């Protein structure tokens, strides 16, 4: 629940959708056009930065001019006091990050379709001169109809320029896995930078993992710059050669080696869908620094396009290698001869010039087992922690180099070890209705248990949660929600025989209201004493609810001990009188009233029948049956004082089961509604809940 807030007298914040490092996103309503929207409200530290606000306005206004099926529409950008906000299209569907987290890698046709839609949206944006600069799964939304929409256009550019210039800690952590090498180095960006980020996203969709990971954002950024371009293993992953080649081209370090435009990429994706077995681009690694040169003794790799020559080394370098080959042969022969002479003279064994170690498979081992195995093999080990949905904590997820690789003795083996399932900050759902809270948490992948307890809060509202809000918890954890069952019911005491004052004091102490306005002269019951009550003793009544009692007005004239005569009185005529006036007249005349109801279209709230009829004689204290005309539906009591609302409900044939207090709206102490709502057909004689604005009485 959030305090109601309206920006520019138009955009109302309804509920929180999520939070990021830069802003909080709300589900809201455009009260002018009467449509649901997403409202992104910037955090205070950005609003205080004049340069950022200037960039924010410039880029957000540019984004508002974008209109494309694959781009989230930006409707408006504005300011309310010191708060800056953006109004956007509300997309009914998850982000691509949520889909990948739930499903792991995606089927190739789905990944290809999503990538083609993203490329289409980027092509349109690039034609208008706008770069995204923050392509990542969290900024890609997917509707229930599988329409992909890019979000955060403009905002991403403003934030990117801001963070790259100021390098404030923590501002680029969420995106560092997707930035291009030139972006990581602070160079000028072009369209190909967005395409590199799209390549990372496509790689993640096809493999279920990121190509570059590390212990810190700086480590990851350096890998973008210097590590080899990752190549998708088409056989083990079942990815077509055509699509693997496209990913490889997108992830080239030098921008000129990538696709020239998003339109060209979209065309390549369409061709890959039609001819998946044909790799239209050569797999290559253009990392700026290489640790080793290719072994010239190995045969050249077969070209993925047999009709094109493989030209990985130019002719002049081949010629130099052939000329220098004999020099190396003579040098090796000399060293071998010298070693042989040394062995002959001094009895020492020949050194092993080709001593290498085959790296074993350490995956699924515990970290202790893997460490022992690596050390025993004559290698060094380094552990990197990473969350995993599938691998148990403290067990190896993957390794580098891969199993079977040949490495020199004392080489470093990097083992990525699981530290359990990814931790997610738990959303605060206190104040939500139980149903809304359960849906919200289940949509994030949590299991939910509801525990009900009596509480003064509104019934069915979440009053607490375990674990606490904000606690990092593993995905798919079970969350316990403590839900209010309303105030604990009160067992109605036996008021009969008590004085009216004492009965009212007991009722107040229990948190209920006792109506003692009805009086009658009842034989054998002293004046001022409760003669009867409703509900009966032992019945349950909600706190704030009402009970009624009949108070005796004193001893009546009963049968004479000598003659047995009974006092008779004249029955007052009450047909046509309002309900309360009629009841008061019957009680004042020395009788008791019993009300029946009849649903009619006219004379509602008045007496339409009486038995015995008025002007007849009846024994003092006897019951007069009256029939009340009622509409058969809950009357409108909004804006009334509580007493008047009770009277209006009674005139319509309804009692008040409970009075609930709220601070949502309306004048203090006035009725703001009923449950069931006004106009709801309800059987006469039933009780309703009265909702009053203000705090409950102490």
Image (spheres, rainbow, N blue to C red):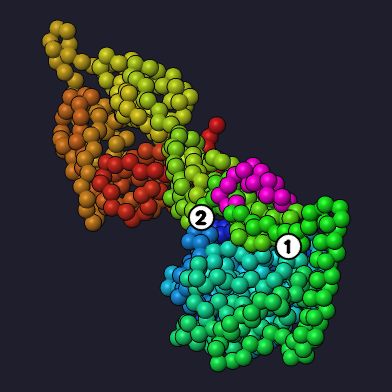
Q: Which residue in the rendered view is the most extreme toward the top?
A: 562
Task: Find out whether residue 672 is within the magenta segment.
Answer: no
**Residue 222, visible in the rendered structure:** yes
Q: Please identify the residue farthest to the left as the structure is shown.
A: 563
The answer to whether 412 is drawn above or below residue 606 in the figure is below
Label 1: state its secondary structure: loop
Q: Is residue 632 above or below residue 48?
A: above
* Nearer mark to the viewer, of 2 and 1: 1
Residue 624 x/y as whole percent: 20, 33
Instruction: Tell me the number on the disc at residue 680.
Output: none
Front position in the image: 496 or 216: 216
The residue tagged 2 is: 444
Mark 2 and mark 1: span between their CA atoms?
54 Å
Q: Are the two marked residues, 2 and 1, in contact with CB atoms closer than 8 angstroms?
A: no
Question: Hey, which quadrant is residue 20 in on the image?
Answer: bottom right
> Does any portion of residue 668 appear in the rendered image?
no
Indicate the quadrant where residue 590 lies.
top left
The structure residue drawn at horizontal position 50% and vertical position 67%, both measured from the top left corner, is 236
Corner quadrant of residue 492: top left
Nearer the observer, 276 or 513: 276
Find residue 240 and report its horizontal and vertical position in percent: 49, 77
Of the image marks 2 and 1, the number of the one nearer the N terminus: 1
Give whichever of 670, 512 is nearer the camera: 512
Q: Which residues are magenta?
A: 362-381
The relative height of residue 529 versus residue 312 in the rendered view (above or below) is above
- Which residue is found at the position 66% from the left and 69% from the top? 178
Q: Is residue 318 left or right of residue 664?
A: right
Quarter that holds the C terminus? top right
Residue 564 appears left or right of 371: left
Determine which of the numbered discs, if any, sits on residue 354 in the image.
1
* x then y, percent, for residue 61: 68, 79
């Amino acid at each position: 629940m959030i305090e109601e807030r309206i920006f520019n007298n138009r955009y109302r914040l309804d509920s929180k959708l999520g939070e990021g490092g830069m802003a909080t996103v709300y589900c809201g309503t455009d009260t002018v056009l009467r449509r649901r929207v997403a409202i992104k409200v910037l955090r205070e530290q950005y609003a205080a930065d004049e340069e950022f606000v200037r960039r924010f306005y410039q880029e957000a206004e540019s984004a508002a001019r974008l209109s494309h099926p694959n781009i989230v529409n930006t409707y408006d950008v504005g300011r309310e006091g010191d708060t800056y906000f953006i109004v956007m299209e509300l997309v009914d569907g998850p982000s691509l990050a949520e889909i990948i987290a739930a499903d792991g890698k995606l089927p190739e046709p789905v990944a290809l379709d999503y990538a083609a839609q993203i490329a289409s949206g980027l092509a349109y944006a690039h034609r208008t001169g706008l770069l995204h600069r923050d392509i990542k799964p969290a900024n890609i939304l997917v509707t229930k109809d599988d329409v992909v929409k890019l979000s955060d256009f403009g905002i991403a550019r403003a934030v990117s320029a801001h963070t790259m210039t100021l390098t404030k800690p923590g501002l680029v952590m969420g995106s560092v896995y997707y930035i291009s090498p030139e972006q990581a180095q602070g160079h000028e960006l072009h369209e190909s930078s967005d395409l590199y980020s799209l390549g990372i996203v496509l790689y993640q969709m096809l493999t279920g993992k990121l190509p570059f990971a590390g212990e810190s954002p700086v480590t990851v950024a350096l890998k973008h710059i210097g590590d080899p371009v990752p190549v998708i293993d088409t056989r083990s992953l079942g990815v077509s050669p055509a699509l693997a080649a496209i990913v490889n081209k997108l992830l080239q370090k030098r921008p000129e080696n990538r696709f020239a435009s998003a339109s060209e990429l979209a065309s390549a994706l369409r061709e890959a869908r039609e001819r998946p077995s044909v790799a239209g681009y050569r797999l290559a690694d253009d990392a700026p620094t290489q640790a080793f040169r290719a072994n010239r003794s190995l045969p050249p790799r077969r070209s993925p396009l047999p009709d094109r020559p493989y030209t990985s080394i130019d002719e002049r370098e081949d010629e130099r290698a052939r000329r220098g080959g004999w020099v190396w042969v003579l040098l090796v022969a000399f060293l071998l001869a010298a070693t042989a002479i040394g062995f002959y003279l001094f009895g020492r064994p020949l050194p092993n010039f080709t001593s290498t170690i085959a790296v074993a498979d350490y995956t699924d081992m515990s970290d202790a087992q893997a460490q022992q195995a690596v050390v025993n093999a004559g290698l060094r080990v380094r552990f990197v922690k990473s969350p995993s949905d599938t691998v148990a904590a403290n067990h190896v997820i993957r390794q580098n180099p891969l199993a079977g690789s040949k490495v020199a003795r004392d080489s470093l083996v990097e083992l990525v070890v699981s530290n359990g399932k990814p931790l997610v900050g738990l959303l605060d759902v206190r104040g939500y209705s139980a149903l809304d809270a359960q849906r919200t948490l289940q949509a994030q992948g949590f299991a939910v248990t509801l525990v009900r307890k009596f509480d003064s809060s509104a019934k069915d509202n979440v009053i607490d949660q375990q674990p606490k809000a904000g606690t990092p918890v593993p995905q798919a954890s079970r969350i316990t929600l403590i839900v209010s069952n309303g105030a604990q019911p009160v067992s109605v005491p036996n008021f009969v025989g008590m004085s009216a004052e004492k009965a009212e004091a007991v009722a107040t102490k229990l948190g209920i209201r006792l109506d003692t306005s009805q009086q009658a002269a009842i034989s054998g019951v002293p004046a001022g004493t409760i003669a009867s009550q409703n509900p009966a003793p032992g019945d349950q009544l909600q706190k704030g609810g009402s009970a009624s009692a009949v108070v005796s007005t004193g001893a009546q004239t009963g049968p004479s001990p000598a003659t047995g005569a009974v006092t008779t009185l004249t029955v007052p005529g009450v047909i046509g009188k309002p309900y309360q006036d009629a009841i008061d007249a019957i009680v004042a005349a020395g009788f008791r009233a019993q009300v029946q109801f009849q649903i009619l279209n006219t004379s509602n709230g008045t007496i339409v029948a009486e038995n015995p009829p008025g002007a007849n004689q009846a024994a003092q204290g006897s019951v007069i049956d009256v029939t009340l005309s009622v509409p058969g539906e809950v009357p409108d009591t909004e804006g009334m004082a509580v007493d008047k609302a009770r009277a209006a409900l009674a005139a319509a044939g309804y009692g008040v089961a409970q009075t609930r207090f709220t601070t949502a709206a309306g004048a203090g102490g006035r009725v703001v509604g009923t449950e069931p709502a006004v106009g709801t057909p309800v059987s006469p004689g039933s009780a309703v809940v009265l909702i009053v604005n203000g705090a409950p009485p102490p």
